[in-house]
Amino acid sequence: MKHTKCYIPEYPRPQLVRADWQNLNGQWQFGFGEEVNYDDAVSGKLPRTICVPFSYETEVSGIADQTSHSTVWYSRAVTGKKGKRTLLHFEGADYQTQVYVNGTFIGTHRGAYSRFSFDITPYLTKEKNVLAVCCTDDNHPVQVRGKQRWEDKNFGCWYVQTTGIYKTVWLEYTDDVYLTHCKITPCITDYSVQFDFGVSAPSDDVVVTFAISFDGKPIKTVGVSAADAENGVSVRLDSAHLTYQAELWSVCNPALYDVEITVAKADKVCDKVGSYFGLREFKAQDGKLLLNNIPFYTKLLLDQGYWKESGLTAPSEAALVRDIELSKQMGFNGVRKHQKVEDERFLYYADILGFVVWCELPSNHFACDDASCVITEEWLRIVRQNYNHPSVVTWVLFNESWGVRNIATNSAQQNLATGLYYLTKSIDPMRPVISNDGWVHTKSDILTLHHYEQDGEKLYAMYDSLDKITKGNAGNAQFSPFADGFVYEGQPIVFSEFGGTAYVRDEADGWGYGCGVRSDDEFLERFGGLIDAIRRMNISGYCYTQITDVEQEVNGLLKADRTPKVPLEKIAEIVGK
């Protein structure tokens, strides 16, 4: 495995890497809201311990209580560094998070699926300071919550809720002048890359330098004044010793450029940051999906990113790598991360291993004005956070009309989906955007279909012509391909959910789609028939449900512990035909 130059094991933000950081994962003090009072909580006097970043509902947290608690408290000691700013980062906490240092309120954040940060430097007054965190989560379906249940028990395809901190918490130390962000946009037309960046204290004497290298060989170094940051900087990657086609990022050749970014004020270096990018283009055009202008047949797995012992949180960095490697061993070239925004380290490994990812907004389940505001705010943060990863090739806004149940005919819900489509395009005009995955699309770059018919021949008969695919069942508007007022415009077509076959063996309960199978031969026959049916449709690809079993669902190709149900090479033989 070939890592980027800036790689640091366990580092949670692989697209903007600093050497001076501290991982705060591990044992914290913990308490449920009903068992502590405010004064004790903000001063760090809590009755339990918990292993962060695992939510209290999980086994590895050390608590394993699946009861819903609306308020949870955390605390631990933190230290600053003399002469440095201390930035506190949360990769993910669900849902409303309030932060205190030494009893002083620092700030709040609403959401669950994007990174948020605080500069806590002014509040560090002691050698050991008390960091206290309060998370509240009322389980209301108006929230962006994905597959988290909002009832007391699991139901359908909804699982145990996730409350509080569930991703890495960490500190980094910087000078007063530092790089705040960097958006990296490649262009394969002229082999260039655009850097749009920000600096904490821009001025005429602050210079930001970008040193680009490939496979250890220097390519270009360009410096620009921070006062001109609003224009960014574009760099042509011209160099006589490079063969450009070999450097395009793809699933077969995940070539990556390294970037060292230096911030200097009056010629004194204030900040050094490592990053990387892939020179690639992914687009929907003329009814096809194109990777670097070559037709790309999408073979995805639906991946909900759950682990038996740790819920939504990967138990280790190695576990993230293993899921990608297992998927590739089975012949798939990517995943649709379903109803979850995965740990950014997963995207890093997808980048370096050559594996595409559809990034999806976890759904809310109740339509109202507040939900529209929550969705918009959180989604734009997600897009900006994951924009630089070459492995991310598609954005998915809604799934099966969840949160917009009346989108077929309701103009307000149609406007929400269409508005988010254009808002996403305003930040990222490169990638395709899907407005409502599965059916009832508004403005959308890809037409996607969901159907869990278990007989391959019957499935093929339902979709064996373009007319059947694009017009659907006129008698059922809820499941038609397009909402009222929207029609097929030649988009590429992907069957983005199908299969879901339950392989139950001797399990007494659990569910999947259709009548469960109980032997390898029976499963492989059904799986092969379904894959063959999709392949014969002459579309742009598919996404099979799903990579692993999840809680009550037993429809994975792998068990929840990642044990294969059938030999991986048998799956790969069918997928690779």
Image (tube, rainbow, N blue to C red):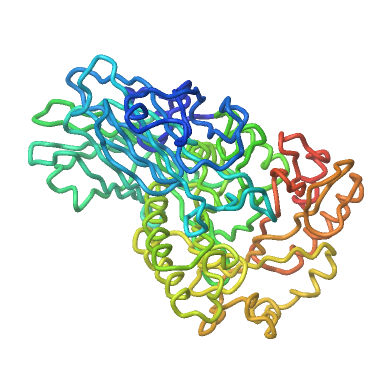
Residue 239, by quadrant, is top left
Q: Which residue is drawn at 48% across and 68% down?
A: 367
Placement of the N terminus among the 4 image quadrants: top right
| Most foreground residue, 67 or 370 | 67
| Most foreground residue, 21 or 250 | 21
For the question of whether residue 284 can be seen, the reply is no
Q: Which residue is drawn at 46% across and 27% down?
A: 30
Q: Which residue is drawn at 32% across and 25% down?
A: 43
Q: Is residue 461 left or right of residue 445?
A: right
Q: Residue furthest top?
A: 127
Q: Residue 423: horizontal and vertical position, in percent?
A: 37, 64
Q: Residue 375: horizontal and vertical position, in percent?
A: 42, 59
Depicted 415 relative to depicted 518: above or below: below
Q: Is residue 233 left or right of residue 207?
A: right
Q: In this view, does 260 lie to the left or right of 352?
A: left
Q: Residue 169: horizontal and vertical position, in percent?
A: 41, 31
Count of picture labels: 0
For the question of whether residue 244 can be seen, the reply is yes
Residue 28, by quadrant, is top left
Q: Residue 141: horizontal and vertical position, in percent?
A: 52, 58
